[in-house]
Image (cartoon, rainbow, N blue to C red):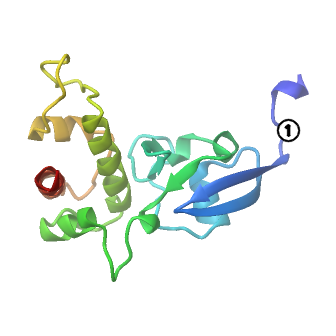
Amino acid sequence: MTDRWIEAGATADVRLTINGQALALNVDGRTSVLDALREHLGLTGTKKGCDHGQCGACTVLINGRRINSCLTLAIMHSGDDITTIEGLGLPENLHPLQSEFIEHDGFQCGYCTSGQICSALGMLAEVDAGWPSHVTTAIEENPALTISEIRERMSGNLCRCAAYPGIVAAIESYAATLKDAA
């Protein structure tokens, strides 16, 4: 039976590329990606909210897809590429979506903002790939990025301050700049 389960206290070597930097870690097999980022690497931009996958504050991009980092183990992602908010922009050189959040007042206390931004980038990639959502009316066609689509696709990221109108406006504005640049 022990060959199917990770024994308490058993550690494992994990190789991850985080924000473009290859790193090797030795972690308890039960360490979540969130705890690996925050407690082992000091990357505290990714927030621990509910720790149950219900609030989205811990959203990061793993191989370009948005994932609640509290719900997945670090050992499951050996060899994967993880992008956190620290990998998107710096205070002196913000990612354009971070700038849109500021421009449109897409945050209040800011606790959920890193997860919102990572989720929004993953969500926009899903739309570009033609993935339908629950509100997509014509699933045979690539979905249009309407306000309803943004709201539905971002519904897994909660904001206790209810900055939702600013968040949606920031995402909509950023998506428009991408469309103009294409």
Residue positioned 83% across, 43% down in the render: 8
Give the image quarter of residue 7: top right
Q: Is residue 76 left or right of residue 180?
A: right
- Disc 1 on helix, strand or loop? loop
**Which residue occupies the foreground of this view, 30 or 176?**
176
Instruction: Answer above or below: position of 131 versus 62.
Output: above
| Picture coordinates of residue 143, whole percent (x, y) | 17, 29
Q: Residue at (54%, 46%) from the top-left corner?
A: 70
Name the residue located 37 percent from the left edge and 53 percent from the top edge.
118
Q: Which residue is mark 1?
A: 7
Most distant residue in the right direction:
2
Residue situated in front as seen by the camera: 100 or 8: 100
Label 1 crowding class (10 Å Cα cut-off): few <14, some 14-19, many 20+? few
User: Where is 39 relative to 62, above or below?
Assistant: below
**Res. 127 image quadrant:** top left
In the shown orientation, is residue 9 left or right of residue 169? right
What amino acid is found at the position of numbered circle 1 in the picture?
A: Glu
Task: Give percent across and percent down for residue 29.
Answer: 76, 45
Where is residue 17? Give x, y as percent: 60, 57
